[in-house]
Amino acid sequence: MGFRVTAAAVGARASSTSSFGYRATAEEVTQGLDLTGKTALVTGCNAGIGYETMRALAMRGAHVYGLARDLGKAERACASVNVVGVPGMATAFACEQTSFDSVRACAEVMLGLNTAIDMMICNAGVYLLPTLELANGIEKHFVVNHLSHFILVDQLLDLVKSAEQGRVVVVGSDAYKFAPAAGIEFDNLAGQRYYDPAKMYGQSKLANGLFVRELARRLDGTRVTSNVVHPGWVVTETMHRLIGSRNIDPQKVEHAKMPKEGAATPCYVATNTALAAISGEYFEDCAVVVPGGHMRDATMAKKLWDVSSELTSAYLNNHG
């Protein structure tokens, strides 16, 4: 990726299997890196994993575009990062990801800056909405967690390609295992047949992995990589709701990560110098893991791309 590495970082970062464990933090996995002159984009920057990702990258010198659903939230998050002693900086942008118009408008502002994007981290998401909600006529988990990022990546892909070694990192989840048995239910994207919050959330996380797989295939031969990460079970109100509503091992609560730990794998995959040639993979705890279910279904990945392109055609550039 062309990142400058100080003596403290030389030889310290492995490839697809790293020395970083379950409790690694975003600061630890980026220690020794000098990201001065690099530009990152983080969606959902105002809280949780997104905020810690933005903070860690700015600490290492990167200029981070921080996106949140409204400008006020983004500005407050960025202001807390832009403090004395932080070599990088964060710039706020509004991107309401239930609105395709807002996603496109945000992308147009960034295109106008004409600056290469070295790291594009698609983190924003909604989780376990108790009742069916639609956005753009489609079930909301699928819209926010997948389609909004599908548009954003499409719009900004040329800026990522113009980087020395651009990276697209999608924050997924092992909740892809909750997706319907058939995988992506293309005939139920609006929840018209039934609505189950866990299945719809799981379907959107499966979509994250399949999107990354197909994007990596399309990027073959370029300098850009595309990977999906499971950040772990991170302490959030949503995670506790999931534990309470499903038959899940209670030890996952006891061993849940803090946001700074949840941000470790996204930061590792976005910055680690040993990963320049690794694409289309699923990472967990800073290591490649082979996912199960439909996550490696190339045929379903291609169909998801085609259906996503159809659903968002009015908002795409030339990569659909």
Image (cartoon, rainbow, N blue to C red):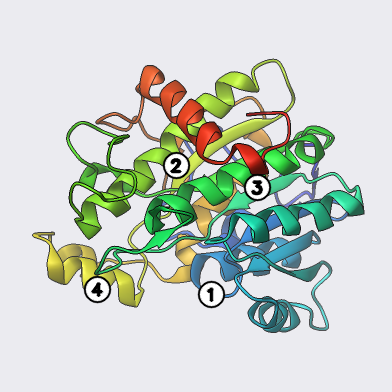
Quadrant including the C terminus: top right
Q: Secondary structure at mark 3?
A: helix
Residue 42, by quadrant, is: bottom right
Question: Which amino acid type corresponds to the residue marked 2 in the rendered image?
Answer: Asn
Q: Point out the tag, 2 or 1, that comes first from the N-terminus.
A: 1
Residue under numbered circle 2: 208
Vertical order, 74 against 66 (above or below): below
Q: Point out the tag, 4 or 3, that comes first from the N-terminus.
A: 3
Q: Position of residue 267 (x, y in %)?
A: 59, 53
Q: Point out the tag, 1 or 4, that comes first from the N-terminus.
A: 1
Q: Secondary structure at mark 4?
A: helix
Query: Mark 2 and mark 1: span between their CA atoms?
Result: 20 Å
Instruction: Work out whether residue 84 or residue 245 is closer to the camera in this orientation and state it.
Output: 245
Residue under numbered circle 3: 152
Residue under numbered circle 1: 47
Vertical order, 191 against 134 (above or below): above
Residue located 18% across and 51% down the image = 194
Q: Secondary structure at mark 1?
A: loop
Whether label 1 touches label 4, CB < 8 Å: no
Residue located 24% across and 31% down the image = 293
Labelled disc at residue 240: 4
Q: Is 162 left or right of 145, judged from the image as shown?
A: right
Q: Is 128 left or right of 60, judged from the image as shown?
A: left
Vertical order, 77 against 123 (above or below): below
